[in-house]
Amino acid sequence: YQMETGSSLITAHASGVDGSIALNDLLFGVSNFTFNGIVPQVTGNKLPAAVNNLTVNNAAGLTLGQNTTVNGNLFFTAGRLSTGANTVTLGAVATVVNETSEKYLVGRLQATRQVGTVATGFGGMGVSIDPLGNDLDSVTVLRISGLAGRRTFGTKESIDRTWLITPQRQPISNCSVTFSWVSADDNGQDLTDAQLWHREDLGPWVEIGAPENVSIGRSITRSTDQLAEFTVFTASGPLPVTLLSFGGRRQGNAVVLNWETASELNNAGFEVERSADLKQFVRIGLVEATPRPQAVNRYRFTDENYTQDSYYRLKQLDRNGQYQLSKPIFVKGGESIAQEGLLLYPNPTNGEVHLVLPDVGEARLTLSVNGITLADFTVTSTQEAERRVSRQLRRLPAGMYLLQTRQGGQSYQNKLVKQ
């Protein structure tokens, strides 16, 4: 490796895994480090906690021995820098230079930038955010590459790269995010039908937008109002049974339940369960899986001659004996739920709500206070509506809010109290 400080240049060649020369700590802090070699190296304690420029020039590979901040350039000439459990942090103006599939950082790379009203990159690490009018304040991006960056969803695997975005302020409306990666992180995926997916707080993965061919540029751009964890899955891979929507409505003395699934793998069917108090559920019926699953599968079940307030949930059964439960929905006794509009519980709430839409289909929701619109968005399922309403409520202070639902030519209003 080489280290430059002031007008002096010190060059040393590693003779072993950890090098052969220990450098005086007085030289550390504003130094430029170049790791040369023809055998694998570990930076060890020769690389301090903060450096000016860091150059990787070892085709055999370099392993990071501790967390390091680079304040200038992280330059790749040859070989890969593996961080392991450690992290390379880019300083305020630091940049990654010359990354390719043959020479790039494998592991954890992090940068923090101010994202005001213009598009902002994150030091050449393959992430750009256009806030589209949102002021996100300080935003931190953690990029994880290699095997540690691979994510799974059922039997589906992502590319070997994940981005965790943590903003000081979440966007109120959609912003645009762009991600790119090197072919070494493809993980053998068919990128002719790639999709960007995200999840919040280690929850379920949700796709954003339609599949597209990114096999040439390895870059994907999407609009979202939630900055969380992102990765890329191929749309053609197998998925577990995914519940797109689950809703219910009263028709006279009966309750009609409808639900949709996005894909089905080894699905045996659904047990329908009912509860009066969310504490004890009883099975009231079984709906077998469709014999020829499609891209979207629709199911229906009628609970005859039941007029009380009730909660319903689905128990999805796999052919191997395993099962998973849906979130419960509430159906009011007596009058039709369509006259009630969007039904929420609990109310008052601490920010997390469960709800059911008047219909299964697209709906527009507007959250406001004292005539001032706080959020206005369109959803296509009960699950999406529940997720987005809860997300908005978690950001708001205690008070009373108005939620308006427009669906199927009808408009409904619900008062909602945040504790």
Image (cartoon, rainbow, N blue to C red):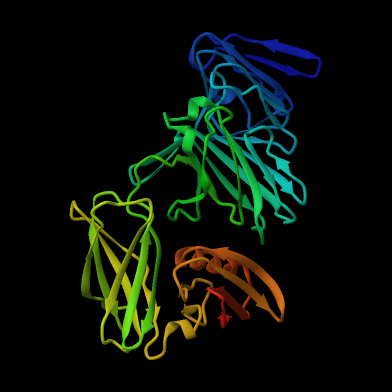
Q: Where is residue 92 in the image (x, y as percent from the top left)?
A: 73, 39
Looking at the image, residue 203 sits to the left or right of residue 325; the answer is: right
Residue at horizontal 71 percent and vertical 29 percent from the top: 29
Q: How many marks?
A: 0
Q: Is residue 289 above or below residue 280?
A: above
In the image, 364 versus 149, the foreground residue is 364
Residue 66 location, quadrant = top right
Quadrant for the N terminus, please: top right
| Residue 198 showing in the rendered view | yes
State whether residue 79 is above or below residue 201: above
- Residue 146, image x and y in percent? 47, 31
Residue sitting nearer the eye, 381 or 292: 292
Q: Is residue 85 visible?
A: no
Left or right of residue 50: residue 315: left
Q: Residue at x 76, y 51 (%)?
A: 116
For the C terminus, the image quarter is bottom right
Q: How far across and down, in percent of the image, does residue 124 sit?
A: 67, 32
Residue 14 percent location from the top left of the image: 55, 11
Q: In this view, does 186 lie above or below 9?
A: below
Residue 64, by quadrant, is top right
Foreground: 188 or 142? 188
Which residue is most to the bottom? 334
Q: Is residue 174 left or right of residue 414?
A: right
Q: Residue furthest front?
A: 409
